[in-house]
Amino acid sequence: MKSLEEIKKIREEKRAELDLRVNTASNSREKHILVCHGTGCTSSKSPKIIENLRRIIEEKNVENVRVVQTGCFGLCAKGPIVIIRPEDVFYSLVKPEDAEEIIEKHIIGGEIVERLLCKDVDNSVVKKLDDLSFYKKQKRIALKNCGVIDPENIDEYIAFDGYKALEKVLFEMSPDDVIKTITDSGLRGRGGAGFPTGKKWEFTKIAEGDQKYVVCNADEGDPGAFMDRSILEGDPHCVVEAMMIAGYTIGANKGYIYVRAEYPIAVHRFQIAIDQAREYGILGENIWGSGFSFDLEIRLGAGAFVCGEETALLESIEGRRGQPRLKPPFPANAGLFQKPTLINNVETYANITKIILNGADWYASIGTEGSKGTKVFALGGNVVNTGLVEVPMGTTLREIVFDIGGGIPNGRKFKAAQTGGPSGGCITEENIDTPIDYESLKAIGSMMGSGGLIVMDDSKCMVNLAKFYLGFTVDESCGKCTPCRVGTKRLLEILERITEGKGEEGDIEKLEKLSRNIKNASVCGLGQTAPNPVESTIKFFRHEYEEHIKEGKCRAGECKALMNLWIDPEKCKGCGLCKRNCPANCITGEVKQPHVIDTSKCIKCGTCITKCPFHAISNK
Amino acid sequence: MVNVTINNRQVEVEEGSTILEAARKLNIEIPTLCFLKGINEVGDCRMCVVEVEGMRGMTPACITKVRDGMVVHTATPKVLEARSVVLDLILSNHDRKCLTCTRNGNCELQRLAQEFNVDEIEFDGERVEKKIDDLSPSIVRDNNKCILCRRCVAACKNVQGIGAIDCAGRGFSSSISTYKDLSLNDVNCTFCGQCIEACPVGALKEKDSTKDVWKALRDEDKYVVVQTAPAVRVGLGEEFGMEIGTNVAGKMVTALRLLGFDKVFDTNTGADFTIVEEGTEFIERATNGGTLPMITSCSPGWVRYMELNYPELIPHLSTCKSPHQMFGAIVKSWYAEKMGIDPSKIYMVSVMPCIAKKFERTRDDMQGTGFDDVDAVITTRELARMIKQAHIEFTGLEDSGFDDPMGEATGAAAIFGTTGGVMEAALRTVAEKVTGKTFDKLDYEAVRGEQGIKRASINLDGKEVKVVVASGLKNAQTILEEIKAGKADYQFVEIMACPGGCVMGGGQPIRSSKDRATIDIRSKRAGALYTIDEASTLRKSHENPVLQAIYKDYLGEAGGHKAHELLHTSYVAREKYKLED
């Protein structure tokens, strides 16, 4: 147990000790080697890097150096990432065997390991993190501590203003003050729907109940999304603290965080955070003598996408099959165990402490008219810098894809980007300059969603894209209501037919009718949004659907059944590589003469395309 | 009271009413499928979606509560399209073999298809062939017809407290399943059949026995005897479009003769035997320190529930067979002897409101004469089917009476068919046996009525007997837990597996969700039984002259050696789940 005074003391001492983490001008004699221990880098052997670094330091008896495991730095495409502080040298694509050189050359020798420095999009070699174009337009609020602190060490969290917002709330603010601050900040739910957070807190506060609960929705399930996961992995205490503030505000003494079991690092670190907070007396009875008590528990989800829907999540916490409930009543009135319950997602909570400490005005000054603050996106797909980005609301898609993301690789063209995952829609070239906020995205037929952002180049077939997302929804439908259970399956079947070249006249209209009614009649958000990828691809790429159906053609060449491979005689040099590699032996031609594909024998495997050094083979 | 506007018409309804209820008050029809009032109120199928001004999307009328000033539209083009797509989707995943379905003509889905003018399936697609479970003696489960409305699940779990079935799998692969998809025969199913009553389609039905009965009727060597349970006569008429609660005993007997049964007897005679035996057993237990409270054993679903869930309490169960089993044993012994018929030639058919009786027939220790007491059990529904199959114009039939000598029964036996009836009948007999007096007041109002659990204290000439009547297995569980905890201060308990008793049994005519929401079916059927009782000249089982004669000439003492051999049985503890090794 630590008194408030002791906590303050830790904050002061630790902050001084860790100043070099955030201050490049620090004259500390110590060096901190920060190694990303997020999911991406972990799977590229970052734990082994940490192990090697520590072993070598010990073997060589190097002093004044510390190896720190941190959460995600964001630039996952270049992982594993190692950063040396205070000088802020950014090493990318580090391998475990690079550890020795980093210690020898950089730490002992004071020389930068040039070969490990990161190449920016323009091929320039960049030394510091802040100089990377990837980071220039970002603003880290929710991710503030990710990549700075050791998430498994509460003292490091405390050092960077940790639990200071809680202190401020408990001793200086009434619940109504908190609600006003959150409301004035303009924060909206980051789970996707964008409901005003202050309002949600207020509804739950005024709801009558002998027991109330605070719940954190960490059931992030969009394919390709890892925002919440990274926050929990990189800065779990900020969620603990925010949930406590929420508990104080609405009058709850108990919180649950619902995390999917397939996020083992997040679960592990969050449990450590809970344990440490309990040990320090931050979680528990009569916290710091304030009279406020709060405790927190983890509930593991089995990975059902529908459990990200708040009422299905509550069902699951209660031990039942994860299926949505009818709303109203809303969770604010009858939630967990039928008691008033506040549910926010991880990223929403991650903004709370900063708003409390810096004030509503500060937060409201970031972003657009209706959407304040920042939004974290998991940037993936056909983009150079895949990873985790946090940008002010109002940033355009072009800025994210081209300035931060570094554009489209392999010289291909941007075709579309999907936001909102399987519930969202695609944004095309014509809308690429739309500022990203809740309303603007909705207006162009997409949605903010929880933050998945998949970029697609011109090699992507949009019918196939809709099929991919529908395949996901069909897998993830809980089966409770008819439109979603059977309707999404039928949508998928039609899309499969079209991509297999068996599309029929009238299929587009069928898709439209079915989509419209699934949206209208489904019970929960999953079904109500499941047809979005179909509707939005039809809206923007109807001609591709028509080409598939009427001409039997897939211009992107993704739908194998519709592939019609052809060798351009102008480009073919007759090298014979395609012929030798064709598994169906259907390519003929004399050396140095244009080759020809016998399409009747072609199995459309695409091997010839990849083998041709002259890009002479394509889908006709 | 709140004011609601539906399709531009105003209606005042009680607060807490649903849109569906409010609409019905205006005679506005909203189609439903998964809705079963008080049992399955989930709003899942989406057939009943409506538009409410100010509400996003559509909402299910069946469970959305009205608010004052609410403006509802139930038949906009948008709503109608959504419903027709929903119906199309359900049909696309249904086997659509209406012609060979037992529910043909009484299927909620079929009716909707008709109403919606479905002439093709627009969104047809994959349908996974599912295996049919017909291994139990009572229930056939055919998931190819299942529309996942989960009314059966709710009936099993919420009403009966069993949970033998639930939804397994997700999304399109969802199916109603048992534990590990075992046969209902190998899980904790009690065969009460409430799931069948709840099913809007033909996914759940009784195991058909009509073919066996037809075969016996065709067999000239067989002496085919039929007996009908009390609840059948107040249910059967519904299958022919008659008013709920019509007593069609006379027409039923005529129809059975036309079908070719050699003798048409009344299970009520068997019920009188049960009362005399059970009453004797109770007095015996009460006077000689036997296990109390004693619980009735006429409901085979209930007996199976006890064996599956509370085997340690089996000594509380009366050893009396149920009326139709007793009756079968008497027919194959006393009657066969008296008429000089070889009992092996007698084919005993029971017409029952119950599907657990099909299982009961196959139990061990149900062969009082060495032959099966009963050879076939058909339900009220199956009898109706046989009558239709024979093209008998049921509603126009003349009345006729049961055959002698075993057509004689008391009013006490008639009320066996409703919850509290066995208790009331038993009290009439026990009161006189214990006190040696004759009573004129025969109506024990305290044990009548629809409540799931009724408790009463009966004064028998200064002696206090506390009794409990429970119907529905969830209520049975409450009582058993009391007994288990040693908190039972009562001596005699009547338990019926089906809520409301046999009139609401799993073999009775299946009523639509709308009927169940708007008509008090139980009261109407039970009321008809009480009318029979009141109109009877004999209203106490022990006064039945046929019984008196059989005891005197053949059985000897009630509860005596021969009576035990023929009229009593034994029970076994059963495993809830039979897993293969």
Image (tube, rainbow, N blue to C red):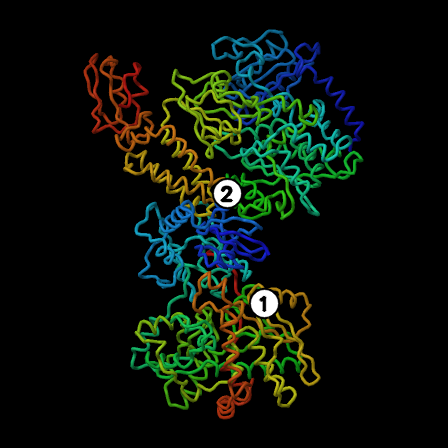
Q: Are marks 2 and 1 on the same chain?
A: no
Residue A422 percent coordinates (x, y): 46, 34
Question: In the image shown, does B484 or B29 lie closer to the viewer?
Answer: B29
Q: Which mark is residue B452?
A: 1
Residue at 30%, 16% (x, y): give it: A615
Q: Which mark is residue A524?
A: 2
Looking at the rendering, which quadrant does residue A3 occupy? top right
Residue A366 percent coordinates (x, y): 61, 21
Which image quadrant: the N terminus of chain B? bottom right
Dot 1 amino acid type: Gly
Residue A129 visible (yes or no): yes
Seen in the picture, residue B316 relative to B557 is either above or below; the reply is above
Residue B132 percent coordinates (x, y): 38, 57
Decide: few, some or many residues near mark 2? Use Cα within 10 Å; few <14, some 14-19, many ≥20: many
Q: Which mark is residue A104?
A: none
Looking at the rendering, which quadrant does residue A496 occupy? top left
Q: SS of the residue at dot 2?
A: loop
Residue A266 percent coordinates (x, y): 59, 32
Q: Chain of mark 2?
A: A
Looking at the rendering, which quadrant does residue A407 occupy? top left
